[in-house]
Amino acid sequence: MSPHQRCYLGLDSSTQSLSAILIAVTGGRAEVLWQDAMPFDETFPEFGTSHGVLPSDDPLVRVSSPEMWVRALEQMLGRVTRCGIDIRSLCAISGCAQQHGSVYLSSTGALTRSVAPIWMDSSTRDECAEITAAVGGAAVLAQRTGSRAYERFTGPQIRKFHKTEPRAYADTARIHLVSSFLASQLTGDDAPLDPGDASGMNLMDLATQDWWPLALDATAPGLASKLPRIVPSATVIGTLAPRWQSRFGLPSARIVAWTGDNSSSLVGTGLVADGHMVVSLGTSDTIAGIMRESRVDPGGIGHVFGAPTGDFMGITVFKNGSLARERVRDAYGLDWAGFSSALRSTPPGNYGRLMFPWFDPEITPDVPVAGVRRVGLEPDDVPGNVRGVVEAQMMAMANHSRWMGVGVRRIHATGGAAANRDVLQVMANVFDADVYQLPVGNSACLGSALRAWHADAASSPDPVPWPDIVRNLAAPVESSRVTPDASAAATYADLRRRYAEAEARLRAAV
Ligand code: XUL
Protein backbone atom coordinates (compact mmCIF):
# COMPACT_ATOMS: atom_id res chain seq x y z
CA MET A 1 0.00 0.00 0.00
CA SER A 2 1.35 3.39 -0.99
CA PRO A 3 1.75 5.86 1.90
CA HIS A 4 -0.28 8.39 -0.13
CA GLN A 5 -3.20 6.07 -0.60
CA ARG A 6 -6.51 7.03 1.02
CA CYS A 7 -9.32 4.48 1.20
CA TYR A 8 -13.07 5.09 1.22
CA LEU A 9 -15.86 2.69 2.01
CA GLY A 10 -19.27 2.94 0.34
CA LEU A 11 -22.32 1.02 1.56
CA ASP A 12 -25.75 0.51 -0.01
CA SER A 13 -28.63 -0.92 2.01
CA SER A 14 -31.07 -1.70 -0.78
CA THR A 15 -34.38 -3.57 -0.74
CA GLN A 16 -32.82 -6.99 -1.23
CA SER A 17 -29.23 -6.73 0.03
CA LEU A 18 -26.47 -4.76 1.70
CA SER A 19 -23.44 -4.13 -0.48
CA ALA A 20 -20.04 -2.58 0.07
CA ILE A 21 -17.31 -1.15 -2.14
CA LEU A 22 -13.87 -0.15 -0.91
CA ILE A 23 -11.96 2.24 -3.14
CA ALA A 24 -8.41 3.55 -2.91
CA VAL A 25 -7.38 6.97 -4.16
CA THR A 26 -3.77 7.55 -5.10
CA GLY A 27 -2.60 10.69 -6.87
CA GLY A 28 -6.20 11.67 -7.65
CA ARG A 29 -7.01 8.35 -9.30
CA ALA A 30 -9.53 5.97 -7.75
CA GLU A 31 -9.61 2.20 -8.06
CA VAL A 32 -11.89 -0.45 -6.60
CA LEU A 33 -9.99 -2.61 -4.10
CA TRP A 34 -12.78 -4.87 -2.92
CA GLN A 35 -16.53 -5.30 -3.10
CA ASP A 36 -19.09 -7.58 -1.55
CA ALA A 37 -22.85 -8.06 -1.31
CA MET A 38 -25.00 -9.70 1.33
CA PRO A 39 -28.47 -10.78 0.15
CA PHE A 40 -30.92 -10.49 3.07
CA ASP A 41 -33.09 -13.56 2.34
CA GLU A 42 -30.18 -16.00 2.17
CA THR A 43 -27.98 -14.44 4.86
CA PHE A 44 -30.73 -13.95 7.45
CA PRO A 45 -33.33 -16.70 6.86
CA GLU A 46 -34.49 -16.30 10.48
CA PHE A 47 -36.23 -13.04 9.50
CA GLY A 48 -38.30 -14.81 6.83
CA THR A 49 -38.04 -12.08 4.19
CA SER A 50 -38.73 -12.63 0.53
CA HIS A 51 -36.73 -10.28 -1.70
CA GLY A 52 -36.00 -8.31 1.49
CA VAL A 53 -39.68 -7.85 2.39
CA LEU A 54 -41.49 -9.40 5.39
CA PRO A 55 -44.65 -11.41 4.71
CA SER A 56 -47.93 -9.49 4.98
CA ASP A 57 -51.59 -10.48 4.64
CA ASP A 58 -52.43 -7.14 3.07
CA PRO A 59 -51.08 -6.92 -0.51
CA LEU A 60 -50.74 -3.14 -0.15
CA VAL A 61 -48.51 -3.38 2.93
CA ARG A 62 -44.76 -3.81 2.47
CA VAL A 63 -42.52 -3.73 5.54
CA SER A 64 -39.03 -4.89 6.41
CA SER A 65 -36.90 -5.33 9.52
CA PRO A 66 -34.62 -2.59 10.93
CA GLU A 67 -33.02 -5.25 13.13
CA MET A 68 -32.04 -7.24 10.04
CA TRP A 69 -30.49 -4.16 8.44
CA VAL A 70 -28.37 -3.57 11.55
CA ARG A 71 -27.27 -7.20 11.65
CA ALA A 72 -26.24 -6.90 8.01
CA LEU A 73 -24.26 -3.74 8.71
CA GLU A 74 -22.42 -5.44 11.59
CA GLN A 75 -21.57 -8.46 9.47
CA MET A 76 -20.45 -6.29 6.58
CA LEU A 77 -18.08 -4.29 8.79
CA GLY A 78 -16.66 -7.62 9.93
CA ARG A 79 -16.13 -8.64 6.32
CA VAL A 80 -14.39 -5.33 5.58
CA THR A 81 -11.84 -6.05 8.28
CA ARG A 82 -11.24 -9.54 6.88
CA CYS A 83 -11.05 -8.49 3.23
CA GLY A 84 -7.27 -8.79 3.13
CA ILE A 85 -6.63 -5.08 2.68
CA ASP A 86 -4.86 -2.95 5.26
CA ILE A 87 -7.76 -0.81 6.42
CA ARG A 88 -5.65 1.61 8.48
CA SER A 89 -5.88 4.00 5.53
CA LEU A 90 -9.69 3.98 5.64
CA CYS A 91 -10.39 7.73 5.81
CA ALA A 92 -14.16 7.99 5.41
CA ILE A 93 -17.33 5.94 5.06
CA SER A 94 -20.62 6.93 3.49
CA GLY A 95 -23.70 5.06 2.45
CA CYS A 96 -27.07 5.12 0.86
CA ALA A 97 -30.27 3.20 1.34
CA GLN A 98 -33.60 2.43 -0.23
CA GLN A 99 -35.57 5.66 -0.04
CA HIS A 100 -38.71 6.51 1.97
CA GLY A 101 -38.52 3.62 4.49
CA SER A 102 -38.86 4.78 8.10
CA VAL A 103 -37.60 3.54 11.46
CA TYR A 104 -39.28 4.54 14.76
CA LEU A 105 -37.23 4.85 17.96
CA SER A 106 -37.95 5.72 21.58
CA SER A 107 -35.88 8.20 23.60
CA THR A 108 -33.66 5.29 24.68
CA GLY A 109 -33.11 4.17 21.10
CA ALA A 110 -35.42 1.13 21.30
CA LEU A 111 -37.70 0.37 18.35
CA THR A 112 -41.25 1.62 18.99
CA ARG A 113 -42.33 -0.23 15.87
CA SER A 114 -40.68 -3.57 15.13
CA VAL A 115 -41.06 -3.18 11.38
CA ALA A 116 -40.26 -0.41 8.93
CA PRO A 117 -42.64 0.47 6.09
CA ILE A 118 -40.62 0.57 2.85
CA TRP A 119 -40.89 2.17 -0.58
CA MET A 120 -42.98 -0.69 -2.01
CA ASP A 121 -45.84 0.02 0.40
CA SER A 122 -49.00 1.47 -1.13
CA SER A 123 -51.34 1.36 1.87
CA THR A 124 -51.63 5.08 2.63
CA ARG A 125 -54.09 6.35 0.01
CA ASP A 126 -56.33 8.00 2.64
CA GLU A 127 -53.42 9.69 4.38
CA CYS A 128 -52.18 11.08 1.05
CA ALA A 129 -55.60 12.64 0.46
CA GLU A 130 -55.73 14.07 3.99
CA ILE A 131 -52.27 15.64 3.77
CA THR A 132 -52.97 17.02 0.30
CA ALA A 133 -56.19 18.67 1.46
CA ALA A 134 -54.58 20.10 4.59
CA VAL A 135 -51.75 21.87 2.74
CA GLY A 136 -54.02 23.34 0.06
CA GLY A 137 -53.94 20.81 -2.78
CA ALA A 138 -51.64 18.60 -4.83
CA ALA A 139 -50.10 21.46 -6.81
CA VAL A 140 -49.09 23.32 -3.63
CA LEU A 141 -47.59 20.18 -2.10
CA ALA A 142 -45.67 19.36 -5.29
CA GLN A 143 -44.40 22.91 -5.68
CA ARG A 144 -43.13 23.05 -2.11
CA THR A 145 -41.82 19.52 -1.57
CA GLY A 146 -41.05 18.38 -5.13
CA SER A 147 -43.78 15.73 -5.26
CA ARG A 148 -47.51 15.37 -4.85
CA ALA A 149 -48.44 12.96 -2.06
CA TYR A 150 -47.27 9.43 -2.78
CA GLU A 151 -48.27 6.37 -0.75
CA ARG A 152 -44.69 5.27 -0.17
CA PHE A 153 -43.44 8.68 0.92
CA THR A 154 -42.58 8.94 4.58
CA GLY A 155 -45.05 11.69 5.53
CA PRO A 156 -48.16 9.65 4.62
CA GLN A 157 -46.56 6.60 6.27
CA ILE A 158 -45.97 8.54 9.50
CA ARG A 159 -49.54 9.80 9.43
CA LYS A 160 -50.86 6.25 9.09
CA PHE A 161 -48.72 5.12 12.04
CA HIS A 162 -49.98 8.01 14.17
CA LYS A 163 -53.61 7.15 13.26
CA THR A 164 -53.38 3.38 13.73
CA GLU A 165 -50.91 3.18 16.64
CA PRO A 166 -51.23 6.50 18.51
CA ARG A 167 -49.58 5.14 21.67
CA ALA A 168 -46.52 3.89 19.85
CA TYR A 169 -46.38 7.13 17.88
CA ALA A 170 -46.44 9.11 21.14
CA ASP A 171 -43.61 6.93 22.49
CA THR A 172 -41.54 7.66 19.40
CA ALA A 173 -38.82 10.25 19.99
CA ARG A 174 -37.03 9.92 16.66
CA ILE A 175 -38.16 8.90 13.17
CA HIS A 176 -35.27 8.05 10.88
CA LEU A 177 -35.11 7.16 7.23
CA VAL A 178 -33.23 3.93 6.51
CA SER A 179 -30.22 6.05 5.50
CA SER A 180 -30.02 8.15 8.68
CA PHE A 181 -30.86 5.12 10.85
CA LEU A 182 -27.85 3.20 9.52
CA ALA A 183 -25.61 6.29 9.60
CA SER A 184 -26.57 6.61 13.31
CA GLN A 185 -25.39 3.05 13.87
CA LEU A 186 -21.98 4.01 12.49
CA THR A 187 -21.54 7.24 14.45
CA GLY A 188 -23.16 5.89 17.60
CA ASP A 189 -25.42 8.93 17.91
CA ASP A 190 -28.31 10.57 16.17
CA ALA A 191 -27.40 11.15 12.51
CA PRO A 192 -28.94 13.91 10.39
CA LEU A 193 -30.55 13.46 6.97
CA ASP A 194 -29.33 14.86 3.68
CA PRO A 195 -31.69 16.77 1.35
CA GLY A 196 -31.51 13.98 -1.26
CA ASP A 197 -33.32 11.54 1.02
CA ALA A 198 -35.34 14.09 3.03
CA SER A 199 -37.01 15.21 -0.21
CA GLY A 200 -38.67 11.77 -0.45
CA MET A 201 -40.92 12.45 2.53
CA ASN A 202 -43.48 15.09 1.38
CA LEU A 203 -42.18 17.08 4.36
CA MET A 204 -39.16 19.09 3.21
CA ASP A 205 -39.36 22.52 1.64
CA LEU A 206 -37.20 22.15 -1.46
CA ALA A 207 -36.29 25.83 -1.57
CA THR A 208 -35.05 26.11 2.02
CA GLN A 209 -33.95 22.45 2.35
CA ASP A 210 -35.55 22.44 5.79
CA TRP A 211 -38.78 21.01 7.18
CA TRP A 212 -41.96 22.71 5.93
CA PRO A 213 -44.04 23.47 9.05
CA LEU A 214 -47.40 23.27 7.23
CA ALA A 215 -46.61 19.76 5.95
CA LEU A 216 -45.46 18.66 9.41
CA ASP A 217 -48.74 19.90 10.94
CA ALA A 218 -50.74 18.19 8.19
CA THR A 219 -48.96 14.90 8.89
CA ALA A 220 -48.92 14.19 12.61
CA PRO A 221 -48.80 16.06 15.95
CA GLY A 222 -45.45 16.96 17.45
CA LEU A 223 -43.61 15.78 14.37
CA ALA A 224 -40.99 18.55 14.29
CA SER A 225 -39.24 17.25 17.40
CA LYS A 226 -39.23 13.65 16.11
CA LEU A 227 -37.39 14.36 12.84
CA PRO A 228 -33.61 14.54 12.40
CA ARG A 229 -31.87 17.69 11.21
CA ILE A 230 -31.22 18.13 7.51
CA VAL A 231 -27.61 18.91 6.55
CA PRO A 232 -25.94 19.40 3.16
CA SER A 233 -25.13 16.12 1.48
CA ALA A 234 -21.35 16.60 1.67
CA THR A 235 -21.30 16.93 5.47
CA VAL A 236 -18.95 14.96 7.71
CA ILE A 237 -21.39 14.04 10.48
CA GLY A 238 -19.00 12.31 12.88
CA THR A 239 -16.49 9.52 13.17
CA LEU A 240 -16.85 5.78 13.40
CA ALA A 241 -18.10 4.97 16.91
CA PRO A 242 -15.50 3.59 19.34
CA ARG A 243 -17.42 0.31 19.64
CA TRP A 244 -16.75 -0.50 15.96
CA GLN A 245 -13.13 0.53 16.32
CA SER A 246 -12.55 -1.75 19.27
CA ARG A 247 -14.66 -4.62 17.95
CA PHE A 248 -13.15 -4.75 14.47
CA GLY A 249 -9.90 -2.80 14.78
CA LEU A 250 -11.20 -0.20 12.35
CA PRO A 251 -9.71 3.32 12.38
CA SER A 252 -11.65 6.39 13.48
CA ALA A 253 -12.84 7.03 9.93
CA ARG A 254 -15.02 10.04 9.16
CA ILE A 255 -18.69 9.32 8.55
CA VAL A 256 -20.26 11.32 5.73
CA ALA A 257 -24.04 11.91 5.68
CA TRP A 258 -25.87 9.03 4.02
CA THR A 259 -28.36 9.65 1.22
CA GLY A 260 -30.98 7.84 -0.83
CA ASP A 261 -29.93 5.20 -3.34
CA ASN A 262 -31.10 7.23 -6.31
CA SER A 263 -29.10 10.34 -5.54
CA SER A 264 -26.08 8.19 -4.74
CA SER A 265 -26.50 6.47 -8.08
CA LEU A 266 -26.22 9.81 -9.88
CA VAL A 267 -22.66 10.09 -8.56
CA GLY A 268 -21.91 6.42 -9.27
CA THR A 269 -22.94 6.86 -12.90
CA GLY A 270 -20.95 10.05 -13.33
CA LEU A 271 -23.97 12.36 -13.53
CA VAL A 272 -22.66 15.39 -11.70
CA ALA A 273 -23.87 17.88 -14.33
CA ASP A 274 -27.06 18.17 -16.34
CA GLY A 275 -27.35 16.97 -19.93
CA HIS A 276 -27.85 13.23 -19.77
CA MET A 277 -29.90 10.70 -17.91
CA VAL A 278 -29.35 7.59 -15.85
CA VAL A 279 -31.69 4.63 -16.18
CA SER A 280 -31.40 2.19 -13.30
CA LEU A 281 -32.86 -1.28 -13.83
CA GLY A 282 -33.00 -2.60 -10.28
CA THR A 283 -35.75 -3.70 -7.90
CA SER A 284 -37.33 -0.41 -8.89
CA ASP A 285 -36.69 0.95 -12.37
CA THR A 286 -35.87 4.64 -12.32
CA ILE A 287 -34.96 7.35 -14.78
CA ALA A 288 -33.23 10.42 -13.41
CA GLY A 289 -31.09 13.40 -14.27
CA ILE A 290 -29.58 16.50 -12.68
CA MET A 291 -31.58 19.73 -12.82
CA ARG A 292 -29.92 23.08 -12.18
CA GLU A 293 -33.29 24.43 -11.03
CA SER A 294 -36.24 22.67 -9.52
CA ARG A 295 -38.87 22.09 -12.24
CA VAL A 296 -41.82 20.23 -10.79
CA ASP A 297 -44.01 18.06 -13.01
CA PRO A 298 -47.33 19.84 -13.60
CA GLY A 299 -48.96 16.45 -14.27
CA GLY A 300 -48.00 15.19 -10.83
CA ILE A 301 -45.79 12.37 -12.10
CA GLY A 302 -42.23 12.07 -10.91
CA HIS A 303 -40.33 13.89 -8.23
CA VAL A 304 -37.75 16.57 -7.68
CA PHE A 305 -35.21 15.49 -5.06
CA GLY A 306 -32.04 17.14 -3.80
CA ALA A 307 -28.90 15.96 -5.63
CA PRO A 308 -25.55 15.22 -3.92
CA THR A 309 -23.96 18.06 -5.88
CA GLY A 310 -26.29 20.56 -4.20
CA ASP A 311 -28.40 20.80 -7.38
CA PHE A 312 -31.76 19.11 -7.88
CA MET A 313 -32.57 15.85 -9.58
CA GLY A 314 -35.67 14.90 -11.53
CA ILE A 315 -36.71 11.28 -11.18
CA THR A 316 -39.55 8.99 -12.18
CA VAL A 317 -39.90 5.67 -10.35
CA PHE A 318 -41.53 2.41 -11.44
CA LYS A 319 -42.32 -0.33 -8.95
CA ASN A 320 -42.54 -3.15 -11.48
CA GLY A 321 -38.84 -3.34 -12.32
CA SER A 322 -36.62 -6.39 -11.89
CA LEU A 323 -39.27 -8.44 -10.10
CA ALA A 324 -41.59 -8.01 -13.12
CA ARG A 325 -38.83 -9.12 -15.51
CA GLU A 326 -38.20 -12.12 -13.25
CA ARG A 327 -41.91 -12.95 -13.09
CA VAL A 328 -42.06 -13.11 -16.90
CA ARG A 329 -38.80 -15.07 -17.12
CA ASP A 330 -40.00 -17.59 -14.51
CA ALA A 331 -43.54 -17.88 -15.89
CA TYR A 332 -42.08 -19.25 -19.11
CA GLY A 333 -39.36 -21.35 -17.47
CA LEU A 334 -36.53 -19.32 -19.03
CA ASP A 335 -33.08 -18.35 -17.80
CA TRP A 336 -31.58 -14.96 -18.71
CA ALA A 337 -29.98 -16.42 -21.86
CA GLY A 338 -33.41 -17.67 -22.94
CA PHE A 339 -34.91 -14.28 -22.08
CA SER A 340 -32.32 -12.60 -24.32
CA SER A 341 -32.83 -14.97 -27.21
CA ALA A 342 -36.61 -14.36 -27.00
CA LEU A 343 -35.85 -10.64 -27.34
CA ARG A 344 -33.64 -11.26 -30.35
CA SER A 345 -36.19 -13.48 -32.06
CA THR A 346 -38.95 -10.85 -31.97
CA PRO A 347 -39.10 -7.60 -33.97
CA PRO A 348 -38.99 -4.09 -32.46
CA GLY A 349 -42.60 -3.03 -31.88
CA ASN A 350 -43.75 -6.63 -31.18
CA TYR A 351 -46.23 -6.43 -34.12
CA GLY A 352 -48.05 -3.65 -32.24
CA ARG A 353 -48.88 -5.90 -29.28
CA LEU A 354 -48.62 -4.33 -25.84
CA MET A 355 -48.15 -5.44 -22.24
CA PHE A 356 -48.77 -3.47 -19.05
CA PRO A 357 -46.68 -5.37 -16.46
CA TRP A 358 -48.48 -4.26 -13.31
CA PHE A 359 -47.65 -7.36 -11.28
CA ASP A 360 -47.73 -5.11 -8.21
CA PRO A 361 -49.74 -1.89 -7.80
CA GLU A 362 -47.76 0.57 -9.90
CA ILE A 363 -46.33 3.94 -8.85
CA THR A 364 -45.96 5.35 -12.39
CA PRO A 365 -48.59 5.64 -13.66
CA ASP A 366 -50.70 5.43 -10.52
CA VAL A 367 -52.32 1.97 -10.73
CA PRO A 368 -53.74 1.03 -7.32
CA VAL A 369 -54.91 -2.47 -8.29
CA ALA A 370 -52.32 -5.03 -9.40
CA GLY A 371 -52.93 -7.03 -12.56
CA VAL A 372 -51.03 -7.56 -15.81
CA ARG A 373 -52.93 -6.23 -18.82
CA ARG A 374 -52.25 -7.20 -22.44
CA VAL A 375 -53.43 -5.66 -25.70
CA GLY A 376 -53.38 -8.08 -28.66
CA LEU A 377 -50.86 -10.30 -26.87
CA GLU A 378 -51.70 -13.90 -25.92
CA PRO A 379 -50.51 -14.92 -22.44
CA ASP A 380 -48.98 -18.14 -23.85
CA ASP A 381 -46.82 -16.38 -26.46
CA VAL A 382 -43.42 -16.76 -24.80
CA PRO A 383 -41.18 -14.48 -26.89
CA GLY A 384 -44.03 -11.97 -27.36
CA ASN A 385 -44.41 -11.60 -23.60
CA VAL A 386 -40.66 -11.27 -23.03
CA ARG A 387 -40.49 -8.47 -25.59
CA GLY A 388 -43.76 -7.13 -24.20
CA VAL A 389 -42.42 -6.60 -20.68
CA VAL A 390 -39.17 -4.95 -21.78
CA GLU A 391 -40.82 -2.68 -24.36
CA ALA A 392 -43.49 -1.72 -21.82
CA GLN A 393 -40.91 -0.74 -19.23
CA MET A 394 -38.88 1.31 -21.72
CA MET A 395 -41.87 3.05 -23.30
CA ALA A 396 -43.35 3.90 -19.88
CA MET A 397 -39.98 5.30 -18.83
CA ALA A 398 -39.62 7.39 -21.97
CA ASN A 399 -43.21 8.70 -21.80
CA HIS A 400 -43.20 9.48 -18.09
CA SER A 401 -39.84 11.29 -18.07
CA ARG A 402 -40.82 13.87 -20.68
CA TRP A 403 -41.87 16.27 -17.91
CA MET A 404 -38.21 16.77 -16.99
CA GLY A 405 -37.77 18.58 -20.30
CA VAL A 406 -34.46 16.87 -21.05
CA GLY A 407 -33.88 15.91 -24.68
CA VAL A 408 -32.38 12.48 -24.02
CA ARG A 409 -29.44 11.86 -26.34
CA ARG A 410 -27.31 9.79 -24.02
CA ILE A 411 -28.25 7.36 -21.27
CA HIS A 412 -25.99 5.80 -18.63
CA ALA A 413 -27.52 2.43 -17.76
CA THR A 414 -27.04 0.75 -14.39
CA GLY A 415 -28.63 -1.93 -12.19
CA GLY A 416 -28.65 -5.69 -12.69
CA ALA A 417 -30.48 -5.75 -16.04
CA ALA A 418 -28.09 -3.17 -17.52
CA ALA A 419 -25.66 -6.05 -18.02
CA ASN A 420 -28.04 -7.41 -20.68
CA ARG A 421 -27.22 -5.78 -24.01
CA ASP A 422 -30.42 -7.05 -25.65
CA VAL A 423 -32.40 -5.13 -23.05
CA LEU A 424 -30.18 -2.08 -23.67
CA GLN A 425 -30.84 -2.30 -27.41
CA VAL A 426 -34.57 -1.95 -26.73
CA MET A 427 -33.75 1.03 -24.49
CA ALA A 428 -31.63 2.70 -27.19
CA ASN A 429 -34.34 2.17 -29.82
CA VAL A 430 -37.24 3.36 -27.66
CA PHE A 431 -35.42 6.52 -26.50
CA ASP A 432 -33.61 6.97 -29.84
CA ALA A 433 -30.50 7.62 -27.75
CA ASP A 434 -27.05 6.12 -27.22
CA VAL A 435 -26.87 3.88 -24.17
CA TYR A 436 -23.66 3.23 -22.21
CA GLN A 437 -22.71 0.71 -19.56
CA LEU A 438 -20.60 1.64 -16.51
CA PRO A 439 -17.37 0.01 -15.38
CA VAL A 440 -18.69 -0.67 -11.85
CA GLY A 441 -22.03 -2.47 -11.62
CA ASN A 442 -23.46 -1.20 -8.33
CA SER A 443 -23.62 2.51 -9.01
CA ALA A 444 -25.48 3.40 -5.79
CA CYS A 445 -22.79 1.72 -3.67
CA LEU A 446 -19.96 3.19 -5.76
CA GLY A 447 -21.64 6.59 -5.39
CA SER A 448 -21.38 6.19 -1.60
CA ALA A 449 -17.63 5.55 -1.75
CA LEU A 450 -17.14 8.50 -4.12
CA ARG A 451 -19.27 10.77 -1.90
CA ALA A 452 -17.10 9.75 1.07
CA TRP A 453 -14.01 10.79 -0.93
CA HIS A 454 -15.60 14.04 -2.07
CA ALA A 455 -16.68 15.13 1.43
CA ASP A 456 -13.35 14.09 2.97
CA ALA A 457 -11.45 16.11 0.37
CA ALA A 458 -13.88 19.04 0.64
CA SER A 459 -12.91 19.54 4.27
CA SER A 460 -9.17 19.38 3.47
CA PRO A 461 -6.88 22.03 1.92
CA ASP A 462 -7.23 20.16 -1.41
CA PRO A 463 -10.90 19.79 -2.33
CA VAL A 464 -11.54 17.66 -5.41
CA PRO A 465 -14.16 18.94 -7.89
CA TRP A 466 -16.99 16.55 -8.82
CA PRO A 467 -15.83 15.93 -12.43
CA ASP A 468 -12.51 14.65 -11.04
CA ILE A 469 -14.26 12.48 -8.44
CA VAL A 470 -16.24 10.61 -11.12
CA ARG A 471 -13.53 10.67 -13.81
CA ASN A 472 -12.30 7.10 -13.93
CA LEU A 473 -14.59 4.81 -11.91
CA ALA A 474 -17.93 6.35 -12.84
CA ALA A 475 -17.22 7.26 -16.47
CA PRO A 476 -19.23 5.22 -18.98
CA VAL A 477 -17.29 2.65 -20.97
CA GLU A 478 -16.99 4.16 -24.48
CA SER A 479 -16.73 0.74 -26.13
CA SER A 480 -20.00 -0.34 -24.49
CA ARG A 481 -22.11 2.11 -26.51
CA VAL A 482 -25.39 0.68 -27.84
CA THR A 483 -26.70 2.82 -30.69
CA PRO A 484 -30.32 3.09 -31.79
CA ASP A 485 -31.48 1.53 -35.03
CA ALA A 486 -33.20 4.22 -37.14
CA SER A 487 -36.11 2.13 -38.35
CA ALA A 488 -36.77 0.66 -34.89
CA ALA A 489 -36.68 4.17 -33.39
CA ALA A 490 -39.31 5.27 -35.95
CA THR A 491 -41.50 2.29 -34.97
CA TYR A 492 -41.34 3.28 -31.31
CA ALA A 493 -42.07 6.95 -31.97
CA ASP A 494 -45.51 5.79 -33.10
CA LEU A 495 -45.90 2.92 -30.63
CA ARG A 496 -45.10 5.14 -27.63
CA ARG A 497 -48.14 7.28 -28.48
CA ARG A 498 -50.34 4.18 -28.77
CA TYR A 499 -48.90 2.87 -25.51
CA ALA A 500 -49.81 6.11 -23.73
CA GLU A 501 -53.37 6.01 -25.11
CA ALA A 502 -53.88 2.36 -24.10
CA GLU A 503 -52.40 3.07 -20.66
CA ALA A 504 -54.88 5.93 -20.11
CA ARG A 505 -57.80 3.71 -21.24
CA LEU A 506 -56.79 0.84 -18.97
CA ARG A 507 -56.36 3.11 -15.95
CA ALA A 508 -59.75 4.68 -16.52
CA ALA A 509 -61.23 1.17 -16.47
CA VAL A 510 -59.69 0.24 -13.08
C1 XUL B 1 -37.47 6.11 -5.15
C2 XUL B 1 -37.97 4.76 -4.81
C3 XUL B 1 -37.10 3.57 -5.11
C4 XUL B 1 -36.31 3.15 -3.91
C5 XUL B 1 -35.63 1.83 -4.21
O1 XUL B 1 -38.43 7.09 -5.02
O2 XUL B 1 -39.04 4.59 -4.28
O3 XUL B 1 -36.26 3.82 -6.20
O4 XUL B 1 -35.40 4.14 -3.54
O5 XUL B 1 -34.65 1.49 -3.32
Image (cartoon, helix red, strand yellow):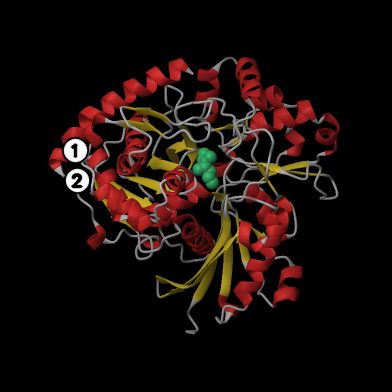
Of all residues shown, which one is farthest toward the front?
A: 380
**Is 36 placed left or right of 73 in the picture?**
left
* Residue 221 at least partly seen: no
Q: Position of residue 142 (x, y in %)?
A: 51, 25
Q: Position of residue 96 (x, y in %)?
A: 56, 53
Q: CA distance from mark 1 to mark 2?
A: 7 Å
Q: Which residue appears at 82% of the width and 29% of the height?
A: 166
Quadrant for residue 87, please give it.
Answer: bottom right
Q: Earlier in the sequence, mark 1 or mark 2?
A: 2
Residue under label 1: 489
Vertical comparison of 431 with 420: above or below: above
* Residue 50 at least partly seen: yes
Q: Are marks 1 and 2 in contact (CB under 8 Å)?
A: yes
Q: Give the crowd class for mark 2: few <14, some 14-19, many >=20 residues within 10 Å.
A: many
Which residue occupies the foreground of this view, 339 or 248? 339
Task: Please name the amino acid that badge 1 sits on.
Answer: Ala
Element carrying mark 2: loop
Which residue occupies the foreground of this view, 210 or 335? 335
Which residue occupies the foreground of this view, 411 or 192? 411
Q: Position of residue 493 (x, y in %)?
A: 21, 31
Element carrying mark 1: helix
Q: Is mark 2 within 8 Å of ligand 1?
A: no
Of all residues shown, which one is farthest toward the left?
A: 487
Which residue occupies the foreground of this view, 238 or 114? 114
Vertical comparison of 181 with 314: above or below: below
Residue under label 2: 484
Query: Residue 306 bears which disc, if any?
Result: none
Q: Which residue appears at 23% of the width and 56% of the height?
A: 481
**Is 66 placed left or right of 401 in the picture?**
right
Q: Which residue appears at 60% of the width and 79% of the height?
A: 88
